[in-house]
Amino acid sequence: MQPVSVIASGMVTAVGLNAPSSCAAIRCAIDNFSETRFMDDGGEWIIGSQVPLEQPWRGLPKLVHMAAPAIQECLAQIGNARPEMIPLLLCVAEKERPGRLAGLDDQLFHDLEAQLGVRFHQRSGVIDRGRVAGALALAEARRLIYEERVPFCIIAGADSFLVAATLAYYEKADRLLTSQNSNGFIPGEAGAAVLIGAPGQSIEPELLCLGLGVGEEKASIASEEPLRADGLVAAFRAAFADAGRTIDDLDYRVTDSNGEQYWFKEAALAMTRTLRARKERFQIWHPADCIGETGAAIGPCTFAVALAAARKRYAPGPGILCHFSGDDGERLALVLAGRA
């Protein structure tokens, strides 16, 4: 077991332009859902979760102006370390997503450095895996901290589903919440970041990542196969083994579930196949209820929500199970623990 600590967070979401305001809104179940400039096939305006920036930026500039302030929140907590000592692991949309913006794999990273006026460590990189990118970035951050002795890593995510081609695809696939489909997600956008380091570097309560597990689901959301949640169960078991914990040691869950029934069914099946003793309560938190489907930004958003709950002591307990699911069948689970 090689634990790492979530030390600081930054967020720019539809419900707040920094981490404290975003996490407070999510804690209170406040959303900012409103009509977008896009129309569905029924002639009604699509409801979305839009970030209210000072200018109507679109495309890559909007991603930059959402991610840069979130990263800056983390940079404010690095002490004597310099940005060039810190790898930035940038999470973006998966390559196969319809309507994916050009420049995500190269231009966005350089635009962020220019906006922030810094240069990051040469081990920085882009992780183009959508919703599971944040968990994969945490695994890479753990490797860099323990094997290459970097002082910190920053995991950042920037994404938007408020793109015409993206909305058209998901509406045609009956996955978008519209006037004609109740089993769908509300499209959103966000920028978020977390500062990762070795345990013991913060005077505030820490959020430790104790274990990580990976699985592969054959009955993906687009598949016709019966869903048994094999991939998520495998990810749970691997994460528990890595952390030296069992599900009995955990108190609640934080997930990337976005409102589609498939993800809740998968989570419920995985729990019934994993739980061996009765738990009185095992809450499931899903920030997408307040900020919409934010794709690659949901990983850092989830870690930020869990960090705020641990530090402000409103979490049901210290043990946390996080899990993320990709459309292609990739499943990741994390065991986190708040520590005073």
Image (cartoon, grey):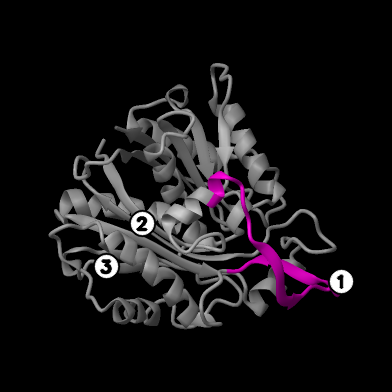
Foreground tag (3 vs 1): 1
Residue type marked 2: Ala
Cβ–Cβ under 8 Å for marks 1 and 2: no
Q: CA distance from mark 2 to mark 3?
A: 11 Å
Residue at x 68% of width, y 54% of height: 223
Foreground tag (1 vs 2): 1
Q: Which residues are magenta?
A: 25-50
Residue type marked 1: Gly
Image x and y of residue 91, in percent? 41, 64
Q: Quadrant of the C terminus?
A: top left
Give SS at disc 1: loop
Q: Earlier in the sequence, mark 2 or mark 3?
A: 3
Residue at x 30% of width, y 59% of height: 74
Q: Quadrant of residue 181?
A: bottom right
Q: CA distance from mark 3 to mark 1?
A: 44 Å
Within 10 angstroms of label 1, few (less than 14), some, or many (20 or more) residues? few
Residue position for label 3: 124
Give SS at disc 3: loop
Q: Is residue 89 visible?
A: no
Residue at x 34% of width, y 65% of height: 71
Q: Quadrant of residue 125?
A: bottom left
Image x and y of residue 20, in percent? 43, 53
Residue type marked 3: Ser
Q: CA distance from mark 1 to mark 2?
A: 39 Å
Relative to 118, say whether 151 is above or below. above
Within 10 angstroms of label 2, few (less than 14), some, or many (20 or more) residues? many
- Which disc is residue 137 wearing? 2
Q: Quadrant of residue 168?
A: bottom right
Q: Earlier in the sequence, mark 3 or mark 1?
A: 1
